[in-house]
Image (cartoon, helix red, strand yellow):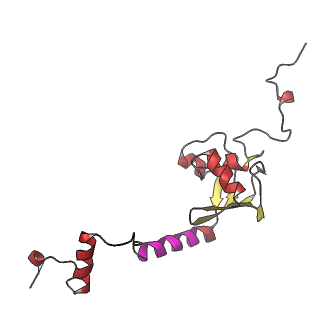
Amino acid sequence: MAQRKHEPSHRQGGDDDGPGGTGGSLRIDKWLWCARFFKTRGLAQEAVDGGHVQLNGDRIKASRQVKPGDRLQVTRDRERFVLDVVSIPARRGPAAEARRHYLETPESESARAAVREFNRLSGPVSTGRPDKRERRDLMRIVKGRGGLSDDDDPA
């Protein structure tokens, strides 16, 4: 009697005990997509190929397998995440489910919070020449009126 294609003996990959378990492995680009670090798998693959993702301190290719216990450094936009892989996701689920598959290091969390606070305090970046409204707001600040119009003057 011939074996069916669905039986585990025909499955390739050998030591993989399936997605969703604590063991096994998954391609790094697929793991990043399932963990919701990137919106599409293609963007995850571009980030890995561009050197924005490191596995245990080494630059890797998108086909590299990630397994629980690995440490990832992911740079996305201007944020840098340092993560420990906890498990392999079975699917790309909601964000709350995705967060269960990794653990961000406390140093990474505090560094990202410091960068966010710095960006918040640094103020808006100029988009070029101010328009009429922005120019009038600037003139009020420079002349010391603090942005109050003539009608709101408390004196």
Residue at point 64% right, 66% down?
105
Closest to the observer: 56 or 29? 29
Task: Say whether residue 31 is left or right of residue 98.
Answer: right
Above or below, 8 against 52 in this view is: above
Q: Quadrant of residue 17?
A: top right
Residue 154, percent across and down?
10, 82
Whether residue 50 is visible to the viewer of this picture, yes or no, is yes
Closest to the observer: 35 or 48? 48
Residue furthest to the front in view is 129
Task: Say whether residue 21 is left or right of residue 119.
Answer: right
* Residue 68 within the magenta-colored segment of the rendering: no
In the rendered image, the quadrant that contains the N terminus is top right
Whether residue 56 is visible to the viewer of this picture, yes or no, is no
In the rendered image, the quadrant that contains the C terminus is bottom left
Closest to the observer: 120 or 23? 120
Residue furthest to the top in view is 1
Residue range highlighted in magenta = 109-122
* Residue 114 within the magenta-colored segment of the rendering: yes
Residue at point 52% right, 74% down?
114
Residue 29, percent across and down?
69, 49
Task: Say whether residue 122 is left or right of residue 61.
Answer: left
Residue at point 61% right, 68% down?
108
Residue 66, percent across and down?
75, 51
> What is the tally of numbered marks visible in this picture?
0
